[in-house]
Image (cartoon, helix red, strand yellow):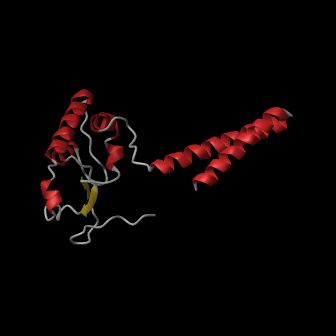
Amino acid sequence: MAKPKQCIHCGKPATIHLTQIVDGEIRKVDLCESCQFKDSMAADFDIEPFAKLAEGVVAAAQKQSGEVHACPKCGCDDGQLQETGRFGCPDCYEAFEPILPDLLGKIQPGLMHEGKVPVHGIRRQATGKKEAELRKQLESAVREERFEDAAVYRDQLRKLEKEKNDGA
């Protein structure tokens, strides 16, 4: 299991993770709540728009459902979420589950976060899937005694393997 990131100023567990890209140079900063304004990059970052967004989503969800949500573990409630724009602990995701789709829909295009993947990783993954599918088809063709089809799949696999070796 990965070790949680630590604040660059005091070493406490970091709850704020900022990434700044300027002229192609990437700067990443991990900070705790109490040190968030000690770093010039964090001081320049305005969290208010995110807090207002969370406030609007929570208010709309409350109005729609008539419920007030609260986390049984940390006590984070709708008011705290509106105020800070953040959950208090991992269990908050379950406590606020009824309003998460609305909240996430306003922050990102889908309900599932899709991080960045290096282009070579995507190609390698696609090649692996294609290779697995061809192997399955080859086995099926041999099992069903469709030897001409099997030869085509075998040739495609060899070509794929050659491309993989040439590109490596």
Count the marks: how many? 0
Residue at left offset 22%, top offset 72%:
10
Q: Is residue 149 left or right of residue 44?
A: right
Question: Which residue is rendered at x = 23% and y = 33% of the image?
Answer: 62
- Compared with residue 128, is residue 28 higher up or lower down, i.e. above or below? below
Extreme-right residue of the structure: 145
Decide which of 76, 42 is in the foreground and name it: 42
Is 123 located above or below residue 28 in the figure? above
Which residue appears farthest toward the front when viewing the image?
166
Where is residue 164? Give x, y as percent: 62, 51
Q: Position of residue 45 (x, y in %)?
A: 16, 52
Q: Position of residue 70 (x, y in %)?
A: 26, 45
Q: Quadrant of residue 55?
A: top left
Q: Is residue 151 left or right of residue 161?
A: right
Residue at 30% from the left image edge and 36% from the top image edge: 99
Occupied quadrant, residue 52? top left
Most distant residue in the top direction: 64
Q: Nearer the viewer, residue 95 or 124?
A: 124
- Give the camera-side residue of 63 and 45: 45
In the rendered view of the protein, which quadrant contains the C terminus? bottom right
34 to the left or right of 137: left
State the image coordinates of residue 76 (x, y, percent, origin top left). Answer: 24, 50
* Residue 122 relative to residue 89: left or right: right
